[in-house]
Amino acid sequence: MCTKRVTKALLRLSFLAGIFASTSVLAHSSATPASASPASGVSVIQDADLRALTTTIGGASVLPTTRTVAHWWGSAVDPHNGVTYGYNMVGADPNNCTGNNCSVTVEVDITPIVVNIDGMTFSGDDIVAGTMDSPLFTVHDYGLTPYATNSVYGRGPGGVLSQGDAGTALQLQDAIMRAQFNKTGSSGYHLILDPVVQSAVTINVPRNQGTLLESGRGVIFADVNINWWAAKIQELETSADATHLPLYLTNNVMLYVGTNPFNCCVIGFHGAQAVGYGGGSTNSHGNAVVQTFAWGSWVQPGLYSHADGGANWALQDIHALSHEVAEWADDPFVDNAVEPWLTPTAPQYGCTNLLETGDPVVDIGFAMGTNSVDQGPNPNGTQSADGYYHPEDEVMLPWFMRSSPNAISEQTQTSSVNIGRYTFMGDLNPFAGFRAPATGC
């Protein structure tokens, strides 16, 4: 997710100060003073200040010969302003592929990160099994969901989800991409993620770069400076395979923007960079290397999610991870620009012109699968976990391109004047702004 457009191929960490300063303004203009928890001695962050935000890092232009993840290029005319926008997406071109070429598999190299901070350890190893068993990498039937986010961001009734793929076993991102381009049912169109777990990496956070915070339900989490953390992740991904997606996995690790730890929290990012920082690029003969990557944190129930299906119900377990994977798939090189959009469901992003599919629908999701991780009561005795995984809804290409009617995506669950859905949840998304194309700023 992001707050401003990043299109240059050689943007590096020097750019982060500017983008994160902008994010800070959008996330919180001020922070409520925290109180200390008598039980833990850790400062408690007020729910009003516990915002969910993600961003992007870097960006790189690609050519058809660039060594990177499998991707395709397309374009669409925005009827609102008459501009033709081009975009890159991961996988096969749904409009031009044939036969076996319509199914693309991308290896996902999962690196768990063990974070030591202020005397506590937050181990990515602890949630590897839960992540591997999640809808990100296991298959499920997306024809129905038992629950979905309601109009006050709590748990509401579910229903028909992707009717075209009812009875078909799919990974989450595969189901989203198939619905986005109306390739459901017997279609051979697929984007399959092949996870390979790498050795864990330990990161020790110094006291001047992070602290511990506690949610209103007693969940203690790591709160780390975003600039410092981003530099650590970029150090790791320089040794990755450019044809794979390196996915860096943490457990209850959030990031703060600027110098105030209560200016929280960034829960994930994805990005791209030209490997070698441009050195020797004149000798690449159009075959330069562009590395994509993502970091996302597992979110323990009760950190954001209130008890008994209350506020922020969907913002737990793989919500952030599903967000980053979806945005990587639809904007792998962080350079897909669209007409600027603004939505009241995600005011923290302000007016932005990036095709980031998760930004408009943060905190909106649905239930899927069976989750056995962190299913006990919250530390304060309340209960937020409900036995399911909670993927995020994702906005689809026609929403950004202002297509109306939408003849590109899977049809809505019930008859609609716009024909196709604008988010994966379709009619289950409770907000009217996703029954029609995006609006301007």
Image (tube, grey):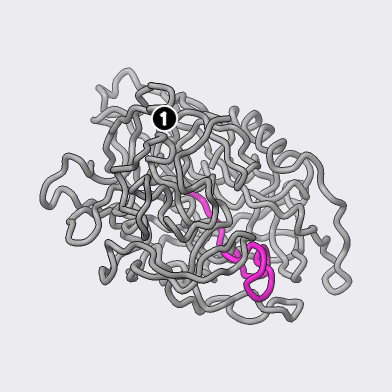
The answer to which quarter of the image holds residue 258 is top right
Residue found 49% across the figure and 38% down from its top: 438
Asked if residue 320 is among those painted magenta in the image, a careful observer would answer no
Task: Bin the neighbour count of mark 1 within 10 Å (Cα to Cα): few under 14, some 14-19, many 20 and up.
Answer: many
Residue at 50% from the left image edge and 33% from the top image edge: 58
Question: Considering depth in this image, is 377 or 252 the residue closer to the camera?
Answer: 377
Question: Bounds of the magenta span?
Answer: 294-314
The x and y percentages for residue 122 are 63, 65
In the displayed image of the protein, which residue is found farthest to the top?
282
Under tag 1, what secondary structure? loop
- Is residue 304 within the magenta segment? yes
Foreground of the two, 74 or 268: 74
Is 316 positioned to the left or the right of 84 in the image? right
Q: Magenta residues: mostly which secondary structure?
A: loop
Quarter-of-image position of residue 67: top left
* Quadrant the C terminus occupies: top right
Q: Is residue 365 left or right of residue 418?
A: right
In the displayed structure, 15 sits above or below 194; it is above
Q: Nearer the viewer, residue 305 or 345?
A: 345
Residue 364, percent from left and from top: 54, 57
Q: Which residue is mark 1?
A: 60
Tally of numbered discs: 1
Q: Residue at the location (33% across, 40% down)?
A: 89
Kindly identify the amino acid type of the residue bearing the numbered disc 1.
Ala
What residue sits 56% from the left and 42% below the top?
Answer: 55
Q: Position of residue 183 (x, y in %)?
A: 24, 53
Does residue 100 appear to the left or right of 111 in the view shown?
A: left
Residue 212, how many percent across, how many down? Answer: 75, 59
